[in-house]
Image: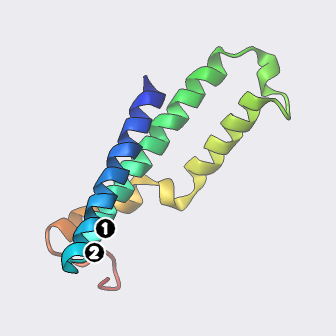
Amino acid sequence: MLADSAEALVTSALDQYMALCRRWAEDGNHFSLEDSLRLWGMIMKAGHMSCEAVDLMFAAASSSAARKGQRMERYYRDCAMYRSHTSSQAANIASGLARVHFGQPMGMFGV
């Protein structure tokens, strides 16, 4: 369910991105920083859901799945790396998105 939901979220974000691209191609109307941040947030949430799915599978797998070189070990390690990357940290985007939505600069440098 988590993997299917994450896939649906990514597909929806891609559909929205393509709609924004078509709008730009048709009338030159650029998509906004808020549009970009919202799409990024959707993709980020899909990543979190995917990692949660891997966590469940890893916990249900036998202990041999944790050995180096095993497929589940690799998936689990990949998710750990994703979670530690700054671009996957929801707090980094949530406050910026809220600020942009309410017409404030996104960060401390007025961007």
Helix, strand or loop at label 2? It is: helix
Q: Residues within 10 Å of mark 1 (few under 14, many from 20)?
A: some
> What numbered label is drawn on residue 90?
none
> What numbered label is drawn on residue 21?
1
Residue at figure coordinates x 41%, y 45% from the top left: 10
Specify the quadrant that holds the N terminus: top left
Type of amino acid at the residue the image marks with label 2: Ala
- Name above or below for residue 81 compared with residue 74: below
Occupied quadrant, residue 24: bottom left
Specify the quadrant that holds the C terminus: bottom left
Residue at figure coordinates x 18%, y 77% from the top left: 27
Residue at figure coordinates x 44%, y 37% from the top left: 7
Percent x, y of residue 37: 32, 63
Percent x, y of residue 52: 51, 31
Percent x, y of residue 105: 24, 78
Type of amino acid at the residue the image marks with label 1: Cys
Residue 63 in view (yes/no): yes
Q: In this view, does 16 lie to the left or right of 76?
A: left
> What numbered label is drawn on residue 25?
2
Give the alpha-carbon distance from disc 1 to disc 2, as whole Å. 6 Å
Q: In this view, does 29 lie to the left or right of 5?
A: left
Percent x, y of residue 3: 48, 30
Which residue of the protein is positioned furthest toward the bottom in this rendering? 109
Residue at figure coordinates x 28%, y 55% from the top left: 16
Which residue of the protein is positioned furthest toward the front in this rendering? 26
Q: Is residue 106 left or right of residue 47?
A: left
Helix, strand or loop at label 1? It is: helix
